[in-house]
C-alpha cells in the first residue's frame, strides 16, 4: 500500500508531485544479496551431495560415544538407508524450493528498483479476500505504542531468542565439525576448541541450554494461557496465510502491484516457528540416545546408526534453513537490511512496523493507508 497523504497534484503538469521520499538502499545492496544467495546455493549443493545416500557411505566415527555399539554391517542396514533417504529428500524438498523462491523474490525486487512498480491486474484477484477476515484489534494495542516505536517482544521472548540463537550457533559449529570430520580444515578447527573431547563437552552443554530454553518457552506459553488468559493465536496458521502466500507469488510474477499487508506475524515467520516443533524433538531424542548409549544399550547396533543418521541430517536441514531462509527474511531483505535489531531491543520503528506488518500497524495506531 502507498501512503499518498503528502502527494500534491500539479494541475499544470497533470501529475502528482511532492511525494514523500523513501530512504534508498545502498548501491551495493543487490550485488551483495545476489552474491550471498549464489554462495549459499553453491554450499547447499555441496552439502546435499555430501549427504546424498548414493555418493557417500554413512560412517559412525570412533570418537562417538555410541561407536562401540555399532558394527560395520549395521550402517548398511535397510533401516539406515531409509532414514538417510528420508532426511535427504526432506532437506532437498525444503531448501531447494525456498532458495529458488528467494532468488525469484530478489529478481522481482531488482526489476522494481530498475523500472518501478509495473501495472498489474490487482482487481482480478479480489476473490482472495474470501480467504480473509478482519482481525480483532489487539487488546494491548494502545500500550504498545512508545513514541516513535512499537513494542513487539517482551523481555522473556527476547531472552528465549537469545538463548536459542547462542546455543544453536554453538551446536551448529561443533556439530558440523563432529559430523563431517573429513571436510578440509576439520582438524584445525577442532584444535581451536581444544580437541575432540572438549568439542563434545561444548556440544553437550549447548544442547542442554537449548533444551532448557525450550522448556522455558513452553512454560512461558502455559503461564500466559492459564494465568494471564492470553492465547498465542497470532502464531497459529490461518486462511490469511494461504491468501498471503498466493498474493506473494502473484507479486513475484508481476501480476500484483503490492506485497501482502501482514498481521502480527508473516506466514514465513510462522513456518520458521513451527518447524522448531519438528526439529527440536528429533534432535533432542536422537542426541540424548547418542549422549548416553549405555542407558539405551539394549538397542540393536543398526538403531544407533539410524539415530546417528537422523541426528546429523536433521542438523543439516536446520542449519541450512537458518542460513538461507531465516537470515534472508529476518535480516537481508530490503525492509530489514542491514540488520534487524527488534528481537534484541523488543521495539521496532513505526515506519519499519508499517512496512513489515502493515495491517496490524493500522490496528495499533488507527492510521490507514490510502491506495
Image (cartoon, rainbow, N blue to C red):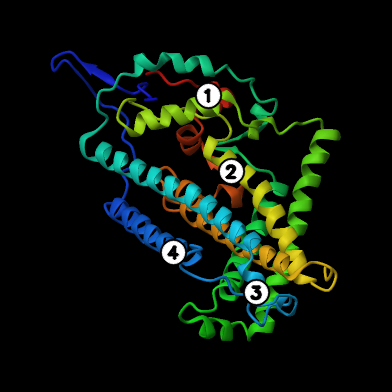
Instruction: Determine crowd level at label 3: few under 14, some 14-19, many 20+ residues with C-alpha closer than 10 A.
Output: few
Circle 2 residue: 347
Q: Quadrant of residue 163?
A: bottom right
Q: Tell me the element at label 3.
A: loop
Q: Are marks 1 and 2 in contact (CB under 8 Å)?
A: no
Q: Position of residue 112 (x, y in %)?
A: 27, 36
Which of disc 2 and disc 1 is earlier in sequence?
A: 2
Circle 3 residue: 73
Which of disc 4 and disc 1 is earlier in sequence?
A: 4
The residue under the point 32% across, 57% down is: 32
Q: Are marks 2 and 4 in contact (CB under 8 Å)?
A: no
Instruction: Determine crowd level at label 1: few under 14, some 14-19, many 20+ residues with C-alpha closer than 10 A.
Output: some
Which of disc 3 and disc 4 is earlier in sequence?
A: 4
- As measured in the structure, the alpha-carbon distance from the residue carrying label 4 to the one carrying label 3 is 23 Å
Q: Is residue 179 above or below residue 237?
A: below
Q: Are marks 3 and 2 in contact (CB under 8 Å)?
A: no
Q: Quadrant of residue 283?
A: bottom right
Q: Are marks 3 and 1 in contact (CB under 8 Å)?
A: no
Quadrant of the image containing the N terminus: top left
Residue 359 vs residue 109, the one in the foreground: 109
Q: Mark 4 or mark 3, which is nearer to you?
A: 3
Q: Which mark is residue 362?
A: 1
Q: Position of residue 303 (x, y in %)?
A: 72, 64
Q: Which mark is residue 49?
A: 4
Side of 79 relative to 122 (left or right): right
Q: Is residue 270 above or below residue 133?
A: below
- As measured in the structure, the alpha-carbon distance from the residue carrying label 2 to the one carrying label 4 is 41 Å
Which of disc 4 and disc 2 is earlier in sequence?
A: 4
Amino acid at each position: 500500500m502507498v501512503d499518498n497523504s503528502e502527494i500534491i497534484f500539479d494541475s499544470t503538469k497533470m501529475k502528482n508531485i511532492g511525494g514523500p521520499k523513501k530512504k534508498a538502499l545502498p548501491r551495493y545492496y543487490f550485488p551483495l544479496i545476489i552474491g550471498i544467495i549464489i554462495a549459499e546455493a553453491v554450499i547447499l549443493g555441496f552439502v546435499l551431495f555430501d549427504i546424498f545416500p548414493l555418493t557417500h557411505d554413512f560412517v559412525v566415527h570412533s570418537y562417538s560415544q555410541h561407536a562401540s555399539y555399532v558394527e560395520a554391517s549395521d550402517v548398511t542396514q535397510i533401516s539406515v538407508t531409509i532414514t538417510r533417504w528420508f532426511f535427504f529428500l526432506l532437506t532437498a524438498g525444503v531448501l531447494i524450493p525456498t532458495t529458488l523462491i528467494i532468488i525469484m523474490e530478489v529478481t522481482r525486487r531488482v526489476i522494481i528498483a530498475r523500472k518501478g512498480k509495473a501495472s498489474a491486474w490487482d482487481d482480478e484477484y479480489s476473490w482472495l479476500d474470501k480467504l480473509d477476515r478482519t482481525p480483532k484489534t489487539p487488546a494491548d494495542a494502545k500500550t504498545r505504542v512508545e513514541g516513535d516505536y512499537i513494542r513487539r517482544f517482551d523481555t522473556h521472548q527476547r531472552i528465549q531468542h537469545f538463548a536459542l540463537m547462542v546455543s544453536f550457533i554453538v551446536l551448529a559449529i561443533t556439530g558440523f565439525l563432529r559430523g563431517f570430520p573429513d571436510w578440509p580444515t576439520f582438524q584445525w578447527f577442532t584444535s581451536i576448541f581444544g580437541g575432540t573431547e572438549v568439542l563434545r563437552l561444548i556440544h553437550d552443554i549447548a544442547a542442554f541450554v537449548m533444551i532448557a530454553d525450550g522448556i522455558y518457552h513452553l512454560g512461558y506459553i502455559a503461564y500466559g494461557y492459564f494465568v494471564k488468559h492470553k492465547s498465542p493465536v497470532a502464531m497459529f496458521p490461518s486462511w490469511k496465510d494461504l491468501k498471503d502466500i498466493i498474493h506473494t507469488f502473484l507479486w513475484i510474477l508481476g501480476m500484483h502491484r503490492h506485497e501482502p499487508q501482514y498481521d502480527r506475524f508473516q506466514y514465513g515467520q510462522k513456518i520458521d516457528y513451527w518447524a522448531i516443533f519438528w526439529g527440536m524433538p528429533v534432535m533432542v531424542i536422537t542426541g540424548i540416545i547418542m549422549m548416553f548409549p549405555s542407558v539405551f544399550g539394549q538397542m540393536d547396533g543398526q538403531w544407533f546408526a539410524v539415530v546417528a543418521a537422523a541426528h546429523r541430517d536433521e542438523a543439516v536441514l536446520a542449519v541450512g534453513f537458518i542460513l538461507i531462509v531465516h537470515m534472508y527474511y529476518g535480516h537481508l531483505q530490503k525492509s530489514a537490511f542491514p540488520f534487524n535489531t527488534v528481537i534484541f531491543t523488543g521495539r521496532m520503528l513505526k515506519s519499519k512496523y508499517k512496512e513489515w506488518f502493515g495491517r496490524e500497524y493500522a490496528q495499533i495506531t488507527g492510521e490507514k493507508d490510502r491506495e
